[in-house]
């Protein structure tokens, strides 16, 4: 483990809340890293009600030259906590690892830094596994095979948060919509992807603990879909013409998905279908006929 007291080249940004069952494993995954450069671990513990903060402080006392635990006077909420923790990261590069995730490979940071620089990327990531709270593997995150990723690819599939490694400046400035999004990590990835190329390292170097109450478990809920629509719309003005069209297509699809799956209210269904059509006017007539067929079905149920 590198214990240099110099300014870190890589910062590990870790937010945590009521993760006392998992936080030690998350921290140990960082502390086992073998690097040729100095690193730091910045922990934003958001005033949870369990022993997470005490555990973090024990590790800080053990590794004072590497770990910094940010003291919170109040609960800030996930996004505000992340923004403050991220802003406290001093490294040129940042890796993310939330308190219920953990790394499994001691050369992860070293390999990702080398890969990023050798391929002139702004971000890279690797494969990962899902695990249940008992630590049992439940399967790979997904079958990712594309080695060179871009903005369009990232709109369809998202890497595990604990797998990404990126240039800090590539994610700045954070747009205003970032403060209200439910999925800050995914929006941040899109911000980074708008600045350059992304690469996949086809290795399994992290595990993500799937909790019933976590964000991962709610990504198909009505509130999450509506929030994602607003989040993607908030990114449109920050991108060029091609990326704006990709964002508008993604927003359109989300409107249709919400209308077809998430609501039975006739007026709301029609509203989102029309918004979907207006957001992306390049849909084929087949798509448009399908939408109006759904409207007609809705009439029959009134």
Image: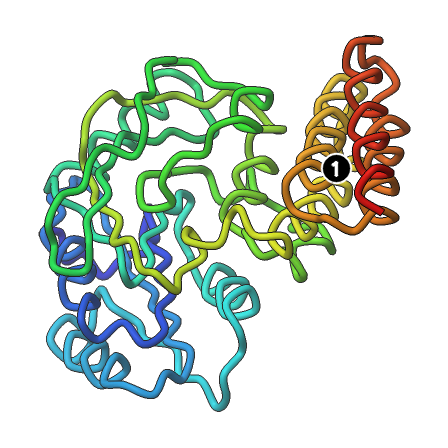
Report x, y in % for residue 278. 90, 28
Asked whether, in this view, residue 6 is left or right of residue 291, the answer is left
In the depicted structure, whether residue 213 falls above or below residue 241: below
Q: Which colour scheme is used?
A: rainbow
Q: Is residue 244 above or below residue 32?
A: above
Write down the quadrant of residue 110 in the picture: top left
Point out residue 24 in the picture as x, y percentages from the top left corner.
15, 68
Identify the image quadrant of residue 293: top right
The residue drawn where x is 61% and y is 38% is: 191
Q: In this view, does 291 lie above or below 301?
A: above
The answer to whether 199 is drawn above or below residue 19 in the figure is above
Kindly identify the residue that appears in the image at 21 percent across and 42 percent down.
Answer: 206
Q: Nearer the viewer, residue 62 or 232?
A: 232
Residue pointed to by mark 1:
255
Which class describes the residues within 10 Å of circle 1: few (<14), some (14-19), or many (20+)?
many
From the viewer's perspective, tell me whether residue 186 is left or right of residue 98. right
Q: Quadrant of residue 15?
A: bottom left
Side (left or right) of 261 relative to 126: right
The percent position of residue 56, horizontal first and vertical second, equals 23, 76
Residue 117 vs residue 252, the one in the foreground: 252
Element type at mark 1: helix
Q: Which residue is drawn at 18% across and 41% down?
A: 138
Task: Report the label total.
Answer: 1
Question: Which percent across, then down, holds residue 234?
Answer: 76, 45
Q: What residue is shown at x 40% (from left), y 43% (from top)?
A: 93
| Farthest residue, direction bottom | 73
């Amino acid at each position: 483990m590198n214990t240099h007291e110099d300014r870190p080249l890589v910062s590990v940004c870790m937010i945590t809340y009521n993760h006392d069952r998992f936080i030690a494993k998350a921290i140990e995954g960082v502390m086992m890293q073998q690097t040729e450069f100095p690193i730091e671990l910045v922990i934003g513990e958001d005033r949870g009600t369990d022993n997470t903060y005490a555990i973090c402080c024990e590790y800080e006392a053990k590794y004072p030259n590497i770990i910094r635990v940010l003291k919170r006077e109040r609960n800030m909420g996930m996004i505000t906590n992340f923004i403050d923790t991220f802003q406290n990261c001093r490294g040129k590069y940042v890796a993310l690892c939330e308190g219920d995730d953990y790394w499994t490979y001691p050369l992860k940071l070293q390999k990702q830094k080398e890969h990023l620089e050798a391929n002139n990327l702004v971000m890279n990531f690797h494969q990962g596994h899902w695990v249940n709270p008992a630590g049992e593997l439940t399967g790979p995150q997904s079958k990712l095979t594309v080695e060179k990723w871009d903005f369009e690819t990232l709109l369809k599939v998202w890497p595990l948060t604990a797998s990404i490694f990126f240039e800090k400046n590539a994610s700045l400035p954070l747009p205003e919509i970032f403060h209200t999004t439910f999925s800050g990590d995914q929006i941040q990835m899109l911000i980074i992807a708008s600045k350059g190329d992304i690469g996949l390292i086809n290795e399994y170097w992290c595990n993500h603990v799937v909790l019933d109450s976590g964000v991962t478990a709610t990504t198909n809920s009505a509130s999450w879909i509506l929030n994602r629509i607003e989040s993607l719309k908030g990114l449109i003005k920050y991108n060029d013409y091609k990326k704006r069209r990709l964002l508008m297509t993604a927003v359109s699809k989300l409107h249709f998905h919400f209308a077809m799956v998430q609501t039975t209210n006739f007026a709301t269904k029609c509203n989102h279908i029309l918004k979907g059509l207006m957001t992306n006017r390049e849909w084929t007539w087949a798509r448009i006929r399908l939408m109006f067929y759904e409207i007609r079905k809705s009439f029959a149920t009134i």
